[in-house]
Amino acid sequence: MLRWIHRTKLSVLNTVWILVPVVIFVVYVFPETPQSGGLSAVQNKFALSECEKRFPELRKRVIVKDSTKEKCEKRFPSAILVGSQKSGTSALLQFLNYHPQIAGCINPDEPRYFNTKLYDNYSLDWYRNLMPCSTSDQITIEKTPEYLYGNTSALRIKKLNDKMKILIILKDPVTVSISVYAMWKALNLSLVDGLSFEDAITKVDANNRKVIATNKPVVYVSTYNLHIPTWLKLFSRDQILFLDGNMYEENPAQVLREVEQFLKLRKFFDESQFVFNATKNKYCFSTNLTSAGECLHASKGRKHPYVPEELKNMLYDYFKPLNLELSKMINHSFSWM
Ligand SMILES: *[C@@H]1O[C@H](CO)[C@@H](O)[C@H](O)[C@H]1NC(C)=O
Ligand SMILES: *[C@@H]1O[C@H](CO)[C@@H](O)[C@H](O)[C@H]1NC(C)=O
Ligand SMILES: *[C@@H]1O[C@H](CO)[C@@H](O)[C@H](O)[C@H]1NC(C)=O
Ligand SMILES: *[C@@H]1O[C@H](CO)[C@@H](O)[C@H](O)[C@H]1NC(C)=O
Ligand SMILES: *[C@@H]1O[C@H](CO)[C@@H](O)[C@H](O)[C@H]1NC(C)=O
Ligand SMILES: *[C@@H]1O[C@H](CO)[C@@H](O)[C@H](O)[C@H]1NC(C)=O
C-alpha cells in the first residue's frame, strides 16, 4: 500500500516535470521550427545568441575573437546547471555569462531537453543547435532546474558526456518550498490548486497530528537528500560543484569565483564589479561591458504566501536533520545549515 502511494505521488510529480516544460516549451521553443537533425549548421554558425542580441558589448567580444579567424560554432555544453528549482539558477547563469570564456546565454533559457519528450523527439544535433555560438576557448553551459529530479536526466546527460561538469546551486529548503508553492500557484498548476500552503506541505499522521509530508511535491522538491544520491552515483564527486544560493545573493562575486575555479576559467570576477542597489535590494553587475549595470533579475520574485512562524518552524525542524544528512553525503556545508 505504502509503495503504491509512493508510486502514485511520484507519477504525479513526473506529470509536473512534464507539464511545466510543455507550457514553457510552446512559448520558447516553437519560434524556431524544429527539424530532426537540426537547423542548417551553416545558417546558424553565426547566428547571434539571445545574449549577444541583448548586450551588443558581448557581440563585439565575439567579433574581436573572429578577427583571429577562428570560426564560432555551436557546441554541446560541457557544464550543466541542473538545479534546484527556485535556488537562483537563472541569476547564476545571468552573471556567469559575463565571463569571456562562458557561452551560456541560450534561447530558450531552459532547454529542458533531457527531462522531456524533446529527448525522444529530437536528435542531439537539434539540442546542440539550441546552444549559443562559441569559440574554442569558451565553455558552453546550459541550465534546467528540473534535471535535478529523478534519474532520467542524469542518465541521459552521462550518456552524452560522462565527463560533464555538473553544477548544483541550493538555497535553504524552507525558502525553496515557499517559492515553489508561489510559482505553482502563479502557474495555476493543479498540484496546488485550492491548497493552502499548509495543506500543500502537511498531512495528518496516525496519531492525528499534523506533520510535514515528504511526498507532497512542495516538500519533495527541496528535500535535497533524496535527489543528490543519483548524481553522486552517476558522476564522480569532483565532477560536481555545489553552490550556495543564499550566499550568491549576498556575495555574487565569491560564488562566481568558485565556478571560475571549478571550470578552470581565467580569473575574471571580483567584488568591484558588483554594486548593491538598495532600492532594488539586489546586486547589479557594473563594468564597461554593460552600459547600465544589469541587476539580478527581480521579475521572477513572486509574492510569497504568508506563512505563520509556527509552520515555518515545523519546516525548519523537518529539514534540519536532512540538511545534516546532505552535508555528510557531499562533504560540503552551506550558509543556511
Ligand atoms: C513528440 O512527438 C509526439 C509524436 O509525434 C508528439 O505528440 C509530441 O507533442 C512531441 N512532443 C514534444 C515535446 O515535442
Ligand atoms: C532510475 O530510477 C528508477 C525509478 O526509481 C529505478 O527503477 C532505476 O533502477 C533507476 N536506474 C538507475 C540506473 O539508477
Ligand atoms: C491563473 O488563473 C487566474 C484566475 O483564473 C488567471 O487570472 C491567471 O491568468 C492564470 N494564470 C495563468 C499563468 O494561467
Ligand atoms: C537602483 O535601482 C533603482 C530602481 O530601479 C534605480 O532607479 C536607480 O537608478 C538604481 N541606482 C543605482 C545607483 O544604480
Ligand atoms: C571603463 O572605461 C573607461 C573609459 O574607457 C576607463 O577609463 C575605465 O578604466 C573603465 N573601467 C573599467 C572598470 O574597466
Ligand atoms: C571533506 O572536505 C574537506 C575540505 O572541505 C577536505 O579537507 C576533506 O578531505 C574532505 N573529506 C572527504 C572524505 O572527502
Image (spheres, rainbow, N blue to C red):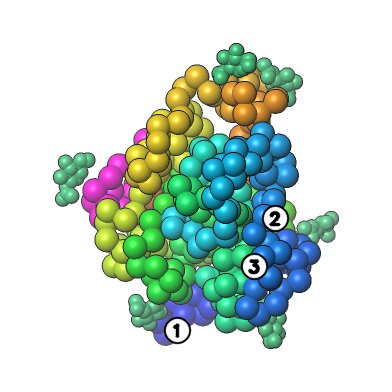
- Does label 2 point to a residue whose CB lies under 8 Å from ligand 1? no
User: Residue at the location (40% across, 74% down)?
Assistant: 159
Above or below 110: residue 88: above
* Residue 328 percent across, percent down from the top left: 23, 51
Number of residues whose C-alpha sits closer than 10 Å to that of mark 3, classed few (under 14), some (14–19) or many (20 or more): some
In percent of width and height, residue 251 lies at: 46, 28
Q: CA distance from mark 3 to mark 1?
A: 47 Å
Q: How many marks?
A: 3
Give the labeled residue for mark 2: 47
Indicate which disc, 3 or 1, sits on the residue closer to the N terminus. 1
Observer-nearest of 278 and 117: 117
Taking the spot 67% from the left edge, 55% from the top edge, the residue there is: 46
Whether residue 53 is situated above or below residue 30 in the rendered picture: above
User: Magenta part of the protein: which range?
Assistant: 320-335
Residue lying at 39% horizontally and 68% vertically, measured from the top left:
161
Q: CA distance from mark 2 to mark 3?
A: 10 Å
Q: Determine which quarter of the picture holds residue 209.
A: bottom left
Circle nearer the N terminus (2, 3): 3
Q: Which residue is denoted by mark 3 in the rendering? A: 41
Magenta stretch contains residue 272: no
Q: Earlier in the sequence, mark 1 or mark 2?
A: 1
Question: CA gap, disc 1 to disc 2?
Answer: 49 Å
Q: Which residue is mark 1?
A: 4
The quadrant of the rendering that contains the C terminus is: top left
Q: Residues within 10 Å of mark 2 (few under 14, many from 20)?
A: some
Q: Is mark 3 within 8 Å of ligand 1?
A: no
**Residue 322 seen in render:** no
Counting from the top left corner in percent of width and height, residue 111 is at 60, 62
* Residue kind at label 3, given as amino acid type: Ala
Q: Amino acid at mark 1?
A: Trp
Question: Disc 2 on helix, strand or loop?
Answer: loop
